Amino acid sequence: QDGSRAGREKKKTVSFSSSLAEKKISSAAGCIHSMVEGSELKKIRPNSRVYQRYYLLDAGLQALFWEPSKKESDKARIFLDSIREVRTGRNTETFRTSGVYEQISEDCAFSIIYGEMYESLDLVANSAEVANIWVTGLRYLMQYGRHALDILANSQDSLRLHWLEQLFSSAADQNKQEVIEEGIPLQSAVKLVQSVNPGVSSGKVEHRFKEIQRLREKTKEQVTKQEFIEVFHDFCTRPEIYFLLVQFSSNKEYLDAKDLMRFIEAEQGVAQVSEEMSLQLIQAHEPSEEGRQQGHLSLDGFTSYLTSSECHLFDREHDTICQDMSQPLSHYYINSSHNTYLIEDQFRGPSDKSGYIRALKMGCRCVEVDVWDGPDGEPVVCTGHSLSRPLALHSVLEAIAKFAFVASEYPLILCVENHCSLQQQKVLLQHLTRILGDKLYRDLPAEGALYLPSPEELRHRILLKGKKLGPDSDGEVSEEDEGAEMSQRIKVSNMPHPSPKRFQLLRELSDLVTLCHSVGFKDFKTSSKAQKPWELCSFHESLALRLAGDSPGDFVNHNKHFLSRVYPNPMRIDSSNMNPQDLWKCGCQIVSMNFQTAGLMMDLNTAWFRQNGSCGYVLRPAIMRQEVSYFSADTKDTVPGVSPQLLHVKVISGQNLPKPKGSGAKGDVVDPYVYVEIHGIPADCSERRTRTVRQNGDNPIFDESFEFQINLPELAMVRFVVLDDDFIGDEFIGQYTIPLECLQPGYRHVPLQSLTGEDLPHAKLFVHVALTNRRGGGKPYKRGLSVRKTRKGREYTALRDLGVRTVDEVFKMAAPLLREAADLRGNMQQNSVAVFRELCGVSAVANLMQCVLALGSRVSGPEGTPLLLFDLRDGYPTLEPQGPLPDVLRRVVSTYDTMVNASKAVVEFADAIYEKILHIQTTAMEFHEKLQSLAMKEGLKGSKVSRALESFSWNITILKGQADLLKHAKAEVEENMKQVHDAALTGNLSKKGLTELICSLKNSLEGDEGVDINEQNGEV
């Protein structure tokens, strides 16, 4: 129910459904008419009480009133000319302090600020659509007054109307229609609609035309111009984009170059947008010739822009290599395939070299080759003790040689699991050296090297992983035989289960293994003492997960120096996949996946490796690479040294959502809903779902917002899943998974993919994304700042005592510096920026550009002159009153001054404190090598020594993290002041801009009689 009076008698009147019988509102005039009919809205009072009232606009379009009310009729109303602002969301003091705040949907709430005292009427609609109608209608009425409908009638979307008339005429010309009034053939009209909305089915469009003609009792199938425009409006008008357009167009039916520039800067987060860039976008996306000539972007042009690659959710910067590739190999996650030759299950499924080709084309950088003795002296590739068909080794190696560097130039690791006799090992050696040739990396590691070479140094090289003989010893072949374990566990009938054979290893074959020498794992203590950087342990999935649970910190530290490979449990005979993030969070670099098996786990893997140009290598989080750092993979709280970020996701709508494959129970009906999932460390894993939209897959409107705190952003991924609500069992429609680092905030379209990873034609979600450390949508720096709400008592990050006096004394010197750094950041972010944001009436994730632009709508004086202006002559813009101010604006000025002073303090003191903290960190690190002996001298034993070592890592991590946060705070100040400067110019709130306007007027009017220019206050 939408809350309208008529809605009490019938199911719906105001809706965005595509049904012909329902009213579809996508114009300001429609909004105003709906307001005259009225809606049921909830009024929120400061005492947290909620009143259900019926709100209407009077027929003369002069006042808003409500019923029932205890007040006299003339008091139960607000005159439109007293309204100063219409604010969306829960962004007034009444909302924020309300006891029902958490129960109110952000998307259904809005406030009317009115009167000399800036009072607020805080309302909650029954749906986001109704809230949009009231906000849009009221803003139009504020701008155009009671003549709004007349003005709208005269200018009603003329750009679109003229364009559609031309489109229709050109179709008539193509069909050689002599009398255009007779119309065009039905199929031509259907194709015209599909040319703008290719996702809509021809059957639905045809049905709509016939329905209209039946109502009008027409017998001919010719479509008239009026019928075409009506159906075009139904299928090609997206109300959610219309409401967005009027929000940024100052209540016009189009965006001009300045409007578009403001939208791209403030919402899409693109820095340094010029009017020229905006005009280029208008030329590229506006379909009407008239609009292009005038520099206006109509609703259809704006829809085209928002659905183009410029507004894709995935940041195209990540389509190319964008990470440092010169770090040691152990510092990267490596895209890895398990039993690459299998294309179905592990036991009976077929083998094919296409498995290698597909994996390598997908950017896989670690493939597996299980080699066994074959007939006629030729080794074969297969899973031992299984029923899978063997492949000739030479054909597999030829495919690898051909496709090894098609998708990526960085090193390929070839895991050779050798089960061959000495005779066939010689053939294996010949094939490797002949087919792979110079691509094989044969250089021995430097004696005493602490780390492996980097991917950059190993470009276009293939590294063999396998067993290696010592200088004077013979060795046996295989350290792992997954097929034998699988065979023994499932006990296939009538099949012998021989214990794995042990063959001698050919020394020449051993010599080809240089940087990836397979060794067994005993425990982390042994590895830290004896393992060399070029030695690699392979972990059975179950063992790796047990180590991740029992010793998460030790596992992370192990992986700072050594490569770890994790392969699936052999009992996964259906080729299902483990969750790679369970191992990535411990720093495991090579998590082998069954590429042939689609689903959530493979979606995570594929999406993860897109973030660095799909090259197969992704740099691990800094906290997992630093020599001394504290990180526990199973943390369920904030990560020391890393500040959490606040992610805000609004799922607005869906487009062209297909019926799930194989589903026929409901015919063509789709009842979609959306899950937003966060995948990452345990503290970050979360999911939220929208409501179900019944019987609408074409353009379901969800309009629901969710917030997530992300504690380790570098390891987080966001996944959108669309499902069909069915009482038998919800069915999968589509999904899209993306690393948090690749998100482009702002208004974005999300292309949906099928269960097997292919794009679903024209199927999309429309979302709005905001992240606390991004410039509305840009990335001035990678890591964010604190998003914790202001508290009366500020929390300071504590350093730990080691129980080693000399080291503790060094760390104690840092305590006052850390408090000072936290105070500098807190005073700026929590005590001033957050309060200024609230006074501007914007959400917690809004940037300062959005704050200033929002402020611009309410600082007009009685004669239209601004009450506040920014002086931009200094690096820190000052906010100056232009006359007497009401209390609410005085608070704005005061809070802004506090914010500027706190920002100046950050810039003034940050560098010195940063240097002092780093100096203490460097001094403390001098104790690192001898810390264990120092602890024992102090009398510490056993677990107390381990605890002292852990506390040392904790303290170093805190010092580094807090110093980095302070550095980022300084960068944030610079970005904030730039945003204020740009927004003041864009929003005509700068003294400089006003002076230039006056000079321009003065020059153009000079000499005219009766013109008086008062430069003091900008009056003409």
Image (cartoon, rainbow, N blue to C red):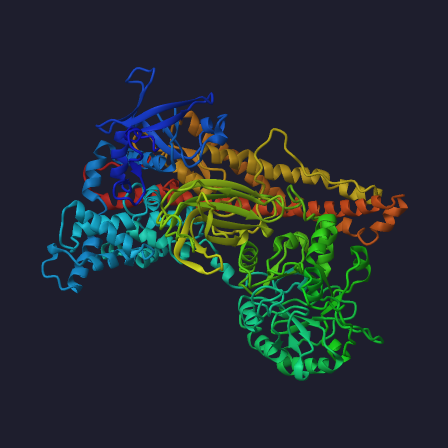
Q: Along the line of sight, which residue is nearer the eye, 899 or 405?
A: 405
Residue at figure coordinates x 48%, y 36% from the top left: 837
Q: Where, quadrant-wise, is the C terminus in this rendering?
A: top left
Q: Along the line of sight, which residue is nearer the eye, 187 or 611?
A: 187
Q: Measured from the top left, where is residue 568 in percent x and y? A: 65, 59
Residue 426 is left or right of residue 743, and the answer is: right
Q: Along the line of sight, which residue is nearer the eye, 634 or 665?
A: 665
Q: Residue furthest front?
A: 494
Q: Measured from the top left, where is residue 126 in percent x and y? A: 38, 32
Snapshot quadrant of residue 558: bottom right
Q: Measured from the top left, where is residue 311 in percent x and y? A: 41, 54
Q: Is residue 871 visible?
A: no
Q: Residue furthest left?
A: 179
Residue 570, placed above or below residue 143: below
Snapshot quadrant of residue 201: bottom left
Residue 779 is left or right of residue 2, and the answer is: right
